[in-house]
Image (cartoon, grey):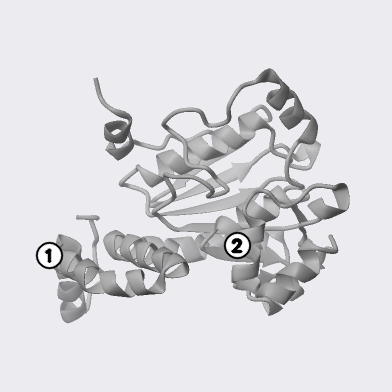
Amino acid sequence: MTSQADETAQSTRMENIPYDQRAKITIERKGQTVLIGINRPYIDNRLDPDATESLARAYYNYDRDPSLRAAVLFGYGDRFSRGIDVDAYKAFAQSGKKMMDGPGFIDPLGRTRPALTKPLVVAVHGDTWNMAHELFLVADIRVASEDTEFGQDENTHGRFPGGGATVRFPREAGWGNAMRFILTGDHWGAKEALRMGMVQEVTPDRDAALAKAVEIASKIAACGPLGIKTSLASSHMALDDSETALGKLDDQYRALYATRDFREGRDAEAEKRPPVYEGR
């Protein structure tokens, strides 16, 4: 019988979940990238517990599929998402059940371990509110269409941002910028998000945002996957403890020097050809 740790370490293959009105989360493999879609446009793409767990399972399967190197999160319909399906979550809470109970999940809000070790790019458009903004904040690279309206307005409803925004928003945008919107509940647009450094690209429309996100993910996927994972791991450590992150750089580099991909990168550069990385 395998332990949870053993199961976590095992690789898997992420299967497509084609677009269908009943599929709350869709999966589309594109070579070494995967597109993950939120598909509840009839309820403003609000996530209920089932959709949240499906997204958590998708992150888990992506992270453990050695053939996939980058992921793109997006939303169907007129908006990325207006956050949680409050009524569905309330009913779930009253049932006494637990969310993501057991192995096979990565919290899409990044609050618990295990965490994503591979790159996540997000493309947003239209309303991107509350929990949806917190999903956006978890991503490593963010693209927004010009019509995006961000919101973190839980305080106007007697709540507070409990999905990570109180940690990530000040870290990403600066204290004053984050408090300006968290404490007032005011919404803001793509240009303001760009000014604060929350997005890396602003595009004319939704289709262009998704296309740009896929383009970025494809460039990431062409890089050495071990170097990408090491870069992410080191950068995440730096956010928590810069001294620890810096102290580990030499060991991390030494580990990469011994890999086949490191040699391939050097050989391809010398031979003036595109590298072919294998993640080993």
Say which of marks 1 and 2 sits in front: 2
Q: Is residue 37 above or below residue 187?
A: above
Q: Is residue 23 left or right of residue 179?
A: left
Q: Is residue 261 left or right of residue 189?
A: left
Q: Residues within 10 Å of mark 1 (few under 14, many from 20)?
A: few
x, y percent for residue 129: 76, 53
Q: Nearer the viewer, residue 73 or 76?
A: 73
> In which quadrant is the C terminus drawn?
bottom left
At 79% from the left and 70% from the top, the residue drawn is 180
Kind of element beneath mark 1: loop
The quarter of the displayed image where residue 249 is located: bottom left
> In which quadrant is the N terminus drawn?
top left
Residue where numbered disc 1 is placed: 258
Q: Is residue 19 visible?
A: no
Kind of residue sitting beneath label 2 = Arg
The quarter of the displayed image where residue 268 is located: bottom left
Kind of residue sitting beneath label 1 = Ala
x, y percent for residue 152: 76, 57
x, y percent for residue 245: 34, 70
User: Which mark sits nearer the N-terminus, 1 or 2?
Assistant: 2
Q: Is residue 233 left or right of residue 148?
A: left
At 69% from the left and 48% from the top, the residue drawn is 131
